[in-house]
Image (cartoon, rainbow, N blue to C red):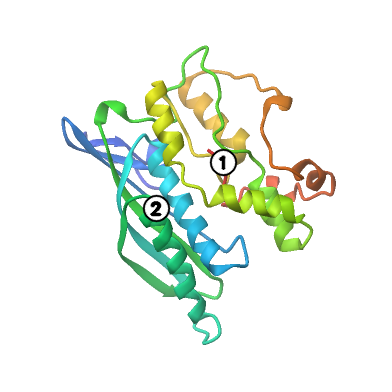
Amino acid sequence: MAAVPPPDDPRVLVGTSQADDAGVFLLSPGEALVATVDFFTPVVDDPYLYGAIAAANSLSDIYAMGGEPLFALAVAAFPDDEKILPLLADVMAGAVDKAREAGICIIGGHTVRDKEPKFGLSVTGRVHPEKVWTNRGAKPGDAIVLTKPIGTGIITTAIKWGISPRETTDAAIQSMARLSAGAARAGRKAGIHTATDVTGFGLLGHLIEVLEGSGLAAELRLKDVPVFPGVRDLMRRRTVAALSARGNFPGSS
């Protein structure tokens, strides 16, 4: 998105120049729209779980901005193959159920033919203009709070390689499919002023964006960072390749 010129419209509260989780557009003094689109290739073999994880990942961008989702559109790319196309219904079912859990509907979408499957949602939500969480609002003395363990990028790579232990795989899938709605409610109750969705760029990548945008530095203690069971063992087995590839992995918030 770096090639897209910043929007010249005062109603755009958060745009392309901020590298945030979603765009925010002012509708009235008391309401703004939050919009995002996110999709990726399969991270698990089960098509239903893939759809649920992709939907939860897209919805998390809205929650990370302090917003509440209103509706979604599906974005799907699948090969024109009689053996694969029936699986798309299962992917859609997982996404529909996850959207229903979030209290919204998938009201449309778009599909294209592609050699490699991809799926996700374009989600629209709402937020009060004065209560938007951006990745530029950190303040001196803030604590860094993770609402989920990290390590999904390593685990999804290990799953593809067939070396992820069952306990590790199950924990990651459960986490990736869990909505961040509860974390967002807790954040609003606590009165937080900045947030970001930790996904493809990992904890450090997203933290650096927050720090650069806020003009601050941070201290992390490795022992205090929650990770999924088995992640450190996978790193010792050199699954760490996922960390250097800056791919799009559904992650932790």
Q: CA distance from mark 2 to mark 1?
A: 19 Å
Describe the element under mark 1 as helix, strand or loop.
Answer: loop
Q: Is residue 2 visible?
A: no
Q: Is residue 246 left or right of residue 87?
A: right
The answer to which of 163 and 35 lies nearer the viewer is 163
Describe the element under mark 2 as helix, strand or loop.
Answer: helix
Chain-order first, disc 2 or disc 1: 2
Position of 206 relative to 139 (above/below): below
- In the rendered structure, find residue 106 and report the number of the disc placed on it: none
Q: Which residue is mark 1?
A: 252
Residue type at mark 2: give it: Glu
Give coordinates of residue 234: x percent, y percent: 79, 48
- In the rendered structure, find residue 101 and report the number of the disc placed on it: 2
Could you classify mark 2 by the number of other residues whose Cα lies within 10 Å: few (under 14), some (14-19), or many (20 or more)?
some
Position of 82 relative to 22 (above/below): below
Could you classify mark 1 by the number of other residues whose Cα lies within 10 Å: few (under 14), some (14-19), or many (20 or more)?
many
In the image, farthest residue toward the left = 28
The answer to which of 201 and 222 lies nearer the viewer is 222
In the image, farthest residue toward the right = 237
Give coordinates of residue 146: x percent, y percent: 56, 32
Total number of numbered discs in the rendering: 2
Q: Is residue 145 left or right of residue 133?
A: right
The answer to which of 19 and 180 lies nearer the viewer is 180
Position of 193 relative to 13 (above/below): above
Give coordinates of residue 185: x percent, y percent: 39, 33
Give coordinates of residue 54: x percent, y percent: 49, 57
Asked if the residues shown at circle 2 and circle 1 are in contact, with their CB atoms under 8 angstroms apart, the answer is no
Residue type at mark 1: give it: Ser
In the image, farthest residue toward the top = 141
Residue at point 55% right, 44% down? 199
Residue at point 61% right, 60% down? 43
The answer to which of 3 and 203 lies nearer the viewer is 203
